[in-house]
Amino acid sequence: MNSKWKQLLVISITAMMVLSAPAVSWAKEGAAPNTAPSASADLAPSARSAILMDADSGTIIYEKNSHAALPPASITKVMTMLLIMEALDQGRIKLTDKVAASEYAASMGGSQIFLEPGEQMSVDEMLKGIALASGNDASVAMAEKIAGTESAFVDMMNKRAQELGLKNTHFANCNGLPAAEHYSSAHDIAVMSRELLKHSEITKYTGMYQDYLRKSSEKPFWLVNTNKLVRFYSGADGLKTGFTNEARFCLTATARRDNLRVIAVVMGEPNTKTRNAEVSQMFDYSFAQYMNHTIFKKGDTMGTVQVVKGVQPAIELKAKHSYSVLLKKGSSVKDIRYELQLNPLKAPITINEPIGKLIVFQGDQVLTEFAVDSPASVKKAGWWTLFKRSCGSLFS
């Protein structure tokens, strides 16, 4: 058999091994969401727009005018916090890093933690200031820490919005102060909130009701969460409030009970009492009507995927977070199954590169789909590595 046919045989065998590997999903939000049967009642009658979404699967339980582009006010900070958490994951910043407030950051009006020009706080403290007090000054200080300027950070925000498939979102700043061409939708906010919740440590900040900044100073600054549901609704632990005269009262909130986490977004509510009552009603409906069936728990090892001509011959697949499907309470789970459809992998592979999809079925009905991305980058192996690997396989 000549070398060309040997190479084709190896690739064919490898592809078969890949396709038979156990399933795993790294969901991209750009994938079309599944929609549950709509609620019979209007769960948010006073909101200009609203949406209720299962956080794990992205299944939409209820929506009202959810794609309307509206001013998001301080809910903008969900994207700001997402980029902060991603910078932490990438090692570009650490929670203990000091962040100095520029004169520009300290000049922000509206909600703030009253940073003085040149004042330094840690990334951890800045996150508290953003998550609890909705600090516009803290948001700009973190934007400058990560990107150098707020303008450069806003470019990152818009790029990330495109990557998430957000069709009705454009940012002009990092804090949500009124500005031309600054808008989002309830649907897009739910998607970015879902992405933020993949960083499970964020609820340490968004679920906190109160804390202090400048604890060791003569004038400690008391922080109280603007989202009162984290204190008064069982299971609520985030995410972000918003208000301007133009946007009115907005909220993206999340709550978890048992194995079900949901995200509720309302925009344009008339006051905080109505806003909180309607989000609570959306939560109540979810927990009364639905349950989650877990396909993979965070950290589950699903197996390995072979990579042709990779420095690493295989990638270990682990769930980065929980993956589940939303079902009506009392539904049978006996006939739920999943299939993995992967493209044959050949190095080089880039982390987060699309490599296929995971499809979850109940019987013959598709319940939901997750896009599957590579969990790691794999460089192409040199000829000597491939030669040694070939020799080893001959004698194994």
Image: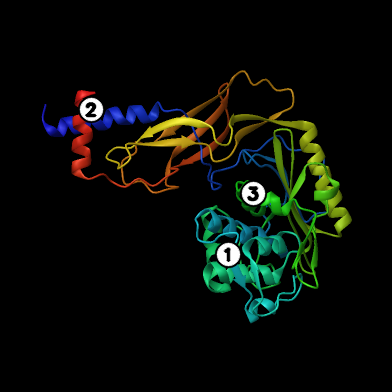
Q: Which residue is mark 3?
A: 201
Q: Residue at x 29, y 37 (%)?
A: 308
Residue kind at label 3, given as amino acid type: Glu
Look at the image and tell me in which quarter the C terminus lies: top left
Q: Secondary structure at mark 2?
A: helix
The disc, 2 or 3, on the residue closer to the chain's N-terminal end is 3
Q: Secondary structure at mark 1?
A: loop
Viewer-side residue, 143 vs 55: 143
Position in image of residue 31 (x %, y %): 54, 44
**Local crowd size for mark 3, using a 10 Å CA cut-off: few (<14), some (14–19), many (≥20):** few
Where 303 sits versus 213, above or below?
above
Q: Which residue is mark 1?
A: 97
Q: Which residue is mark 2?
A: 393
Position in image of residue 290 (x %, y %): 74, 32
The answer for how far apart the CA atoms under marks 1 and 3 are is 17 Å
Where 388 sits versus 174, above or below?
above
Q: Residue at x 32, y 31 (%)?
A: 15
- Residue at far left of view: 2
The disc, 2 or 1, on the residue closer to the chain's N-terminal end is 1
Where 239 sits versus 329, above or below?
below
Q: How is the image coloured?
A: rainbow
- The answer, for residue 341, to whether it is visible in the render is yes
Label 1 vs label 3, nearer the camera: 1
